[in-house]
Image (tube, grey):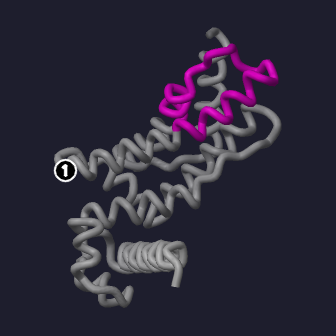
């Protein structure tokens, strides 16, 4: 067996273990809530050793955050409607729909509550960095089309777009409807167009 085959098998097994553990974690969150996630239970249901889960994630909180972040990356894709307004509306609607799911709500609560543990804080920061990088694609397309001024800040745009959605989902628990999304996008675009 060559060294490359050994590496490939290890990486393949590692990826399978990670996927199995994260899938089971999401199932537990969906079935019983994030508070019910226990590493021993997740390991048993995923068919892996408990020590492997502890070694990789360290705590139920880190496991939960990783599972939710991974899931959200898969669920929240950036649209390409051909216009920045359409892109922002479609993206905001997908965020709102995700926040309305048990897993989306759990992610929002987990990210809002995790501030003491350095690993959890880094997971949260990494999530927002990757979202900002993805939002840069939307902004770059819009500036190329002449819809936004050059050097529009993607991170600020993302924050201004999703903040009202998270505010309603986490704090006021008011519905997030199409009117709110359309209004938020229109106000945001008016501000961005002024440079």
Q: How many marks?
A: 1
Task: Give the percent coordinates (x, y) of residue 50.
Answer: 24, 82
Residue lying at 60% horizontally and 36% vertically, measured from the top left? 135
Magenta range: 132-161
Please provide percent x and percent y for residue 160.
50, 29
Q: Quadrant of residue 41?
A: bottom left
Say left or right for 35 vs 183.
left
Based on the picture, tell me whether residue 72 belongs to the magenta stretch: no
> Residue extending furthest front?
2
Q: Residue at x 52, y 74 (%)?
A: 8
Q: In the rendered view, does 145 fall on the left or right side of 187?
A: right
- Res. 30 visible in picture: no
What residue is shown with label 1? 117
Viewer-closest of 37 and 122? 122
Where is 61 relative to 28, above or below? above
Quadrant assignment, res 14: bottom left
Label 1 Cα crowd, 10 Å radius (few <14 / some 14-19 / many 20+): few
Examine the rendered structure and indicate whether residue 74 appears above or below residue 8.
above
Q: Residue at x 21, y 47 (%)?
A: 118
**Residue placed at 81% from the left, 24% from the top?**
145
Residue 61: % across, % down: 25, 62
Q: Quadrant of residue 168?
A: top left
Compared to 164, does 117 lie above or below? below
Q: Is residue 34 left or right of residue 130?
A: left
Location of the C terminus (image quadrant): top right
x%, y% of residue 15?
47, 73
Main SS category, magenta section: helix
**Residue 47 is at least partly visible in this image:** yes
**What secondary structure is found at the residue carrying circle 1?**
loop
């Amino acid at each position: 067996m060559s060294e490359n085959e050994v590496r490939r098998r290890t990486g393949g097994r590692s990826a399978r273990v990670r996927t199995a553990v994260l899938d089971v974690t999401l199932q537990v969150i969906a079935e019983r809530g994030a508070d019910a996630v226990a590493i021993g239970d997740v390991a048993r249901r995923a068919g892996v050793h408990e020590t492997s889960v502890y070694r990789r994630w360290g705590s139920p909180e880190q496991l939960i955050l990783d599972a939710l972040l991974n899931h959200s990356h898969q669920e929240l894709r950036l649209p390409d409607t051909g216009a920045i307004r359409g892109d922002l509306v479609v993206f905001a609607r997908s965020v709102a729909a995700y926040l309305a799911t048990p897993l989306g709500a759990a992610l929002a609560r987990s990210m809002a509550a995790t501030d003491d543990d350095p690993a959890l804080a880094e997971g949260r920061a990494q999530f927002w960095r990757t979202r900002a990088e993805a939002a840069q694609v939307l902004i770059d397309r819009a500036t190329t089309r002449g819809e936004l001024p050059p050097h529009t800040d993607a991170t600020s745009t993302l924050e201004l777009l999703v903040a009202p959605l998270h505010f309603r989902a986490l704090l006021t628990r008011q519905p997030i409807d199409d009117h709110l999304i359309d209004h938020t996008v229109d106000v945001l675009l008016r501000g961005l167009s002024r440079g």
